[in-house]
Image (cartoon, rainbow, N blue to C red):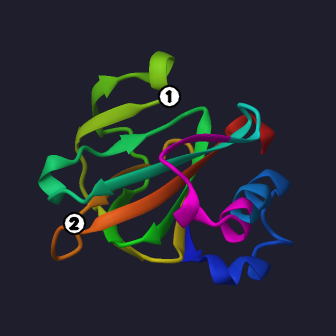
Amino acid sequence: MIFDKISNLKLYEKVLPAPLIKGLQYLKETDIVKLESGKYEIDGENIFAMVQDYSTFPKEERRPEAHRKYIDIQYLSKGSEIIGFAPARSDYQIDEDLLEEKDLLFYSQIYDETDLVLDEGMFAIFFPDEIHRPCCQNRAESYVKKVVVKVAASLI
C-alpha cells in the first residue's frame, strides 16, 4: 500500500512501474470535478478510471474487500473519507467471492485494520490481496467525489 498526496507525484516517477505512473498522471492532469460518474478508459481494459459520487457510510456498514487482477489507485477529488487497510492474512475468512464477475472478494471480519484518512488531493494504492474498506465516514457523513483507477496487475 502507498498513501500520499497527488502533489507528491514527482517522488514516485522513478520508483513506481510505468503503468502506475500513467494512472497517477491521469489523476493529476484531469479535471475530475467536471467528469460525470462512470468508466473512463486510459489504456483499454489495462488501465481505466471509475468516477464515483456518493456519501460516506458508517464503517460497520462497509465490508473489507480485496482484488486479484487489478491494482486500485483510489483518489479523492472532493470530500473526506476513511479507508480501512490490512495486509493479507491466510486466516481472514472470505465472506463472498465475486472474483469471476467483478475481481472482488469480500471478507467477513479482519483484525489489525489501520484507518487511512483520505482528504481532497490524496491517493492510496492497494495491490492485489491487500485488504481495504473504502467509503467510510471520517467523523461524519461526507459527500465524496472519488476516482478509482484500475491497473491490471499483469502489467507490473
Q: Nearer the viewer, residue 112 or 151?
A: 151
Q: Residue 144, relative to residue 149: is it above or below?
A: below
As drawn, is 114 to the left or to the right of 28? left
Residue 52: x and y, percent?
Answer: 43, 50
Label 2 SS: loop
What residue do we see at 84% from left, 56% from top? 18
Q: Nearer the viewer, residue 33 or 44?
A: 33
Q: Is residue 25 visible?
A: yes
Q: Amino acid at mark 2?
A: Gln
Q: Amino acid at mark 1?
A: Asp
Q: Quadrant of residue 27?
A: bottom right
Q: Which is more N-terminal, label 2 or label 1?
A: 1
List the residue tagged with mark 1. 103
List the residue tagged with mark 2. 137
Q: Which residues are magenta?
A: 26-40
Q: Nearer the viewer, residue 134 or 109?
A: 134
